[in-house]
Image (tube, helix red, strand yellow):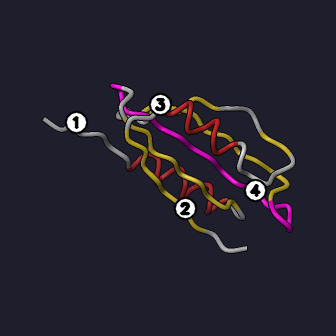
Amino acid sequence: TATGILVAGFLGQDWSAVLDAYEAQLNCTEAGDVQDIDNGYLAGAGVVYSGCGDVGGSTGLVVLGTPDGGAAILLVAQLNTDADFDALNRAVASLIYLPAF
């Protein structure tokens, strides 16, 4: 299975609503514990799923929201190796939020 990270933005949506919507779309047999995530700019949650797709791989789902609750960012990653986990962690750490004035 190919690796990579899908990133999508949602204006006017709370991060928890985005998490709920995308959790229902995953084709995985087991969900790990929901982990709170805060990178200093955005906060939300992440979950690692196993038994995903035809090959039973792992998928990481992270949703972060802006402090004002006006937008959310979704990251979905195919996690085949430790390097994939590292890449997802680096992607989360690199996100910042600058409110429009």
Q: Return the x and y of residue 41 as percentages of the image width and height.
A: 35, 34
The residue that mark 1 highlights is: 99
Residue ranking furthest to the left: 101
The residue located at (81%, 62%) in the rendering is: 53
The residue that mark 4 highlights is: 58
How dense is the environment of label 4, judged by Cα within 10 Å: few (below 14), some, or many (20 and up)?
many
Cα separation between marks 2 and 4:
13 Å
Cα separation between marks 2 and 1:
24 Å
The residue located at (22%, 36%) in the rendering is: 99
Residue 62 to residue 2: above or below? above
34 and 15: which is toward the camera: 15
22 and 76: which is toward the camera: 22
Looking at the rendered structure, the secondary structure element under dot 4 is: strand
Which callout, 2 or 1, points at the residue further toward the start of the chain? 2
Cα separation between marks 3 and 4:
25 Å
Determine which quarter of the picture holds residue 56: bottom right
The residue that mark 3 highlights is: 14
The residue located at (53%, 51%) in the rendering is: 75
Foreground tag (3 vs 4): 3
Q: Return the x and y of residue 73 as percentages of the image width and height.
A: 45, 45
